[in-house]
Image (cartoon, rainbow, N blue to C red):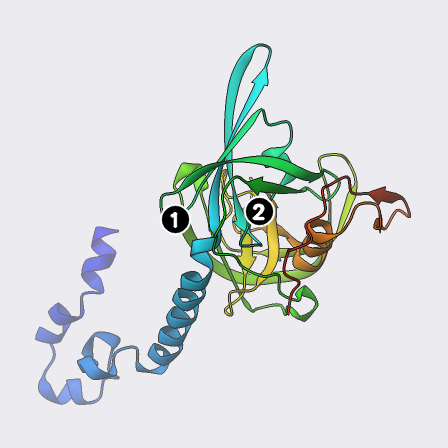
Amino acid sequence: MVSLARRAWVPRRRRLETGAARCHLPRMPLDLPPGDRGAPDSGLLDAYSHAVSGAVARVAPAVAHVRVERARHGRGREGSGSGFLITPDGYLVTNSHVASGAAAIEVTLPDGRTASARIVGDDPDSDLAVLKVAASDFAWIRFGDSSGVRVGQVAIAIGSPFGFQHTVTAGIVSALGRSMRAQTGRLLDNVLQTDASLNPGNSGESRFDARGDVIGVNTAVIMAAQGICFAIASSTAERVAIARPIDVLVVRRDRTLTTLTATPVESAPRGG
């Protein structure tokens, strides 16, 4: 590697060239004047950066780190994940596999506030859960329309990978309409595939677009791969999060019916 780097060192090679020979050589990237370096892409990259940072500024105050305690065999066991607030009075969406079976739940917000939370809705078949945080006056975000999502568009997330709270990652939507099995064995339809990083602790975080609208909820990753992550579409998540369980039967691809047993979240904002 060292020898290759030395052979590619342009300034050394140019000392051996005559001025006349140099005139007939193509200009190498290192020869570009400072104002020309990266000029063709600099505008695009700058626009991308502004889009991501602007969306993050809108969404970040509504993102929470979720810490869970479970009692098993007489001993406490801790876990963690992420979630996002969908109402100003403290209704929060996360994954069922993050919150299910919790003996105690605590959420931490970017402003440093911590509060206890309880499960008010749990649907393992869609891997979604709704928590009620014991506080109020929260920042919140709304569900977008996942039917308008296109392959290649920006997909951003904020979560707590390995406990590093409020970490931002960004990528693109890699594919639409994927299907996968929930932990219960049920088939999840209309799943988004993205390449933005997903690690332990990211479960339950929102995938949002450049406007700051939620387009999906992270649920799974193929650990042996790189950049193959899956999110429950926002259209599914919104239906599960705000529907009255007595009124809604979820019809799945295998033609079975499932009723969500959850306290209705009447004040949750509908997308739009």
* Residue 30 horizontal/vertical position (percent): 21, 74
* Residue 211 horizontal/vertical position (percent): 51, 70
| Residue type (three-letter) at the residue carrying disc 2 | Leu
174 shown above or below 261: below
Q: Which residue is mark 1?
A: 110
**Which numbered disc, 2 or 1, marks the residue that appears first in the sequence?**
2
**Residue 60 relative to residue 268: left or right:** left
Q: Which residue is mark 2?
A: 92
* Residue 208 horizontal/vertical position (percent): 54, 61
| Extreme residue in the right direction | 255
**Residue 191 relative to residue 87: left or right:** right
Q: Nearer the viewer, residue 199 or 89?
A: 89
> Measuring 54% from the left and 65% from the top, which residue is drawn there?
209
> Measuring 16% from the left and 85% from the top, which residue is drawn there?
22
- At mark 2, the secondary structure is strand
Q: Nearer the viewer, residue 103 or 44?
A: 103
* Residue 132 horizontal/vertical position (percent): 59, 41
Q: Nearer the viewer, residue 228 or 241?
A: 241
Q: Quadrant of the C terminus?
A: bottom right
| Residue type (three-letter) at the residue carrying disc 1 | Pro
How far apart are labels 2 and 1 at the CA level?
A: 15 Å
> Measuring 12% from the left and 79% from the top, which residue is drawn there?
17
193 shown above or below 64: below
